[in-house]
Image (tube, coloured by chain):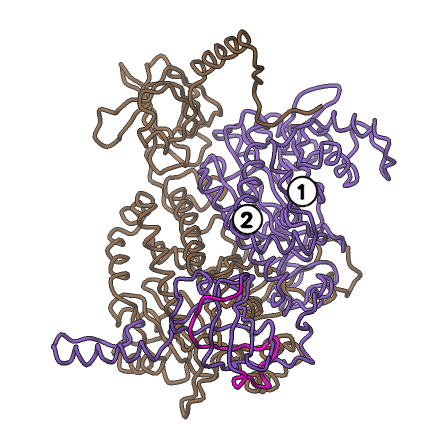
Chain colours: A brown, B purple
Amino acid sequence: MFRAAATMFSVTPTASLCRGVLFSIRHYCKRTPTKLRVSQAFSGTELGANVKVQGWVRSIRSQKSNLFLHLNDGSSLQSLQVVASPELNDPSLTFGSAVEVTGVLKKSPHRNQPVELEADQIHVVGECNPVDFPFKTKERHSLEYIRQFPHLRCRTNAFSSLLRVRSEATTAIHSYFKENGFVQIHTPVITSNDCEGAGELFQVEPSSAEVEEGENFFSVPAYLTVSGQLHLEVMSGAFSRVYTFGPTFRAENSQSRRHLAEFHMVEAEVSFTESLEDLTKVMEDMFRSATEHVLAHCAEDVDLFHKHVTPGHRNAVDFMLKERFPVITYSEAIDILNRSSQKFAFPTHWGCDLQTEHEKYLVKHCGNIPVFVTDYPYDLKPFYARDNKDHPRHSAAAVDLLVPGVGELCGGSLREERLDLLRARLEEVGLEDTYSWYLDLRRFGSVPHGGFGLGFERYLQCILGVDSIKDVIPFPRFSHSCPL
Amino acid sequence: MFRAAATMFSVTPTASLCRGVLFSIRHYCKRTPTKLRVSQAFSGTELGANVKVQGWVRSIRSQKSNLFLHLNDGSSLQSLQVVASPELNDPSLTFGSAVEVTGVLKKSPHRNQPVELEADQIHVVGECNPVDFPFKTKERHSLEYIRQFPHLRCRTNAFSSLLRVRSEATTAIHSYFKENGFVQIHTPVITSNDCEGAGELFQVEPSSAEVEEGENFFSVPAYLTVSGQLHLEVMSGAFSRVYTFGPTFRAENSQSRRHLAEFHMVEAEVSFTESLEDLTKVMEDMFRSATEHVLAHCAEDVDLFHKHVTPGHRNAVDFMLKERFPVITYSEAIDILNRSSQKFAFPTHWGCDLQTEHEKYLVKHCGNIPVFVTDYPYDLKPFYARDNKDHPRHSAAAVDLLVPGVGELCGGSLREERLDLLRARLEEVGLEDTYSWYLDLRRFGSVPHGGFGLGFERYLQCILGVDSIKDVIPFPRFSHSCPL
């Protein structure tokens, strides 16, 4: 009636039949070369074996006695060199075409590659017309150029390296949190509250006439989340340490190199905090641990950026990791800015918000390393930030992490855990009903806690030295742009 | 000007000063108990140490000679028993209150707990009025009851176990893909295409008047993704093996126990496929690997469900993992259904879609184990499904994985990689312009490939035996419901 999914042939236990089966297994093995990915071929364990490698042609060189191909399958930046008789050449064997090559894996006589594939068969699986294909062999296309082809740019070296780094950095961040006892929470994308009370929101309704005019699908207006913070705070009342890593949204009409309508945030929330140091420690340790992991596990891919996109950036990254990140207060930051001889577009005074120009100056002033700025003016911060109860310069226990090249990478705060203070502030802004559930968190077993969010794309910009945020995300979305 | 974030005191290298500093370090260490999480306390390595444990009170028992507390901090299902003098009791020490206990960690005289904390100090950090708090000590609240309190239900044993399992299953799935050479891609939430051509879509626009009447923020109508498949297919043309794990959306007006407006999908795409077996292998291996990981790493949490929510479900899960999953074709499935004596609400014939009642019957027929159904009628499947070119029963190379209790868990297919066939089908439905970028993927280095999606919440329902999908996600969203 049904067959097991993975069983290719069954063996019955009679001797003569067994011999027959064994013969055909051997025969089958001899005829069927081992399928290898390019990264596996480079490991060198299959030297001398009869293998099949599948991928896309990255270069072709036809000489009198030999045909050379470079084959890439995305498993690594490096392509595998294929050496074949010129007779195996074919007009459909072009840059970008998909091929399947069988042959023997040999030690390469060339110093810069460990192995090469001596082909006895080359099969073109999918052709690629070199005239129509927007990328050309041996040309180094700019990030701006390849950005025009969102469905094809992953086929370039630069963007495939970016995506491997992005994948590895994601792994590293998950590992950091797991090793440190955090529970991962999938905070919702659709929400009925607006965490920041600021940020432009996207609203969500069914596209068809599922809902009566004037009614909402969810009975209430629903938005795309601008932060998972409040949902994480719910969870921090049970788990002590939680984090989320997912998409967040801003409907800002901006096409800047630092903003997207959809981006990824890493957010964490820690209970039983004593001071901002409980947060800065997690922020810094996560940054270090992820960066060290990526530098170690994606060396080639990172090098591509550090050599060809922003030459010399590796030194900048190593320098960032050398010492513990300094901490200055907002008041100290304002003093630094006020004493500066640089002319800022936005003049500074105690109480003003820090602009990107100020953040960059502070980073430079501290020696081009990441720097924490703490204790921002109370009036600049949202209702949930913890009141430092100081005066006359009234501040909140909030902290930003500023990094070279990017400015603000993380923002966080201790949260107001004191029911009376939180209720008073919510009443002031007329939100005590909207946030009655949030007040409940303080009504029942409230604990001092705090958290932060890190912009994942900005993090990648920072460690790779990529100027535009559009070049560190698979499919960038911003105003007037949502192809595919 | 600024201080290092983690430096608490500096040590200068003069002997006399060093002695002074060492003294104060010792003094400091003696006075400051080691902070421990409950799971760390259970590890037993800190026996005899002076420790501080912070968490929420799960039970209180006051006897003449002793006060007993159970303290939970979310690091494990088990609570730590605290033994204290009755003098440390306090009216604010109630079920649900947050406390900080210092004392000495001792071997417990009781068999069912390895350690207990002999308290010398109990500090109530956050009170919890037992009258207002919706959960009561020693009561076992139903999943339906706790669902009414989305901001508090994580404080119950059942839901905190669920969330730890969910977090661990997420880790396990990422690990499976990483170990098998898949690159993780963050496919976008906001998209301008509708993958299925079916499913009700949510549309997205800024909530404020950012955009002129009749204009779109993204210049085109934009929707919440119903699947990352097409974006993964872009990537499969460069990486061979890719996956995504993120939120997906359906604007279905349903309140069923199997559907949500926002849910999580695991989707994978594999290049250079030879047959559906290349997909069923990944689907089955991922299911096994994740399930075995969760059973091994969350034994206590899983047990809670297998003992108290769906007694006996552990046997069902073990049974599912015993043998390779059987594979039947859609035609065989229809034969089975046609021959069945069961009366179905929807009668069956070759060409009909399989309803949940049919799927459940097939699972039962195959012995209450997961079963693959392959080669569905061509006309039932979307444009991208690969044409099997058979007749008269014209089928496509599509596959579903049906599982006990849930029905369809995964759906996948080989994709039509042949440009001429794909173009013809898109022209038939008038979509060749909309999907010209998708045709490009076949124009340039096309390869046979395929992929599938797994509903992550349904997976959790299946392995834990949870009846309603609303009880396996932190914040369920469905029609008329989006609190918080």
Task: Locate residue A451, reporting x and y percent.
Answer: 47, 70
Residue at x 35%, y 20% (from the top left corner): A49
Is B98 magenta? The answer is yes
Q: In which quarter of the image is residue A52?
A: top left
Q: Which amino acid does label 1 sit on?
A: Ala
Relative to B101, is B482 above or below? above
Q: Left or right of A478: which side holds A206?
A: right
Q: What residue type is labelled 2?
A: Val
Quadrant containing the N terminus of chain B in the rendered view: bottom left
- Which is nearer the eye, B443 or B321? B321
> How busy is the neighbourhood of tag 1: few (under 14 within 10 Å), some, or many (20 plus)?
some
Q: Does dot 1 land on a helix, a strand or a loop?
A: helix
In 3D space, how far apart are the residues under numbered discs 2 and 1 (Cα atoms)?
15 Å
Task: Locate residue B59, reporting x and y percent.
Answer: 60, 73
- Which is nearer the eye, A66 or B75? B75
Residue at x 32%, y 26% (from the top left corner): A81
Task: Locate residue B369, reporting x and y percent.
Answer: 67, 36
> Mark 2 = which residue?
B294
Relative to A54, is A244 above or below? below
Residue lying at the far top of the rendered structure: A16
Callout 1: residue from which chain? B
The range drawn in magenta is B86-110
Relative to A230, is A110 above or below? above
Say whether residue B426 is visible.
no
> Mark 1 = which residue?
B316
Task: Locate residue B385, reporting x and y percent.
Answer: 64, 32
Of circles 2 and 1, the one toward us is 1
Q: Earlier in the sequence, mark 2 or mark 1?
A: 2
Q: In which quarter of the image is residue B346?
A: top right
Is A169 magenta? The answer is no
Q: Left or right of A126: which side holds A430?
A: right
Say whether residue A138 is visible.
yes
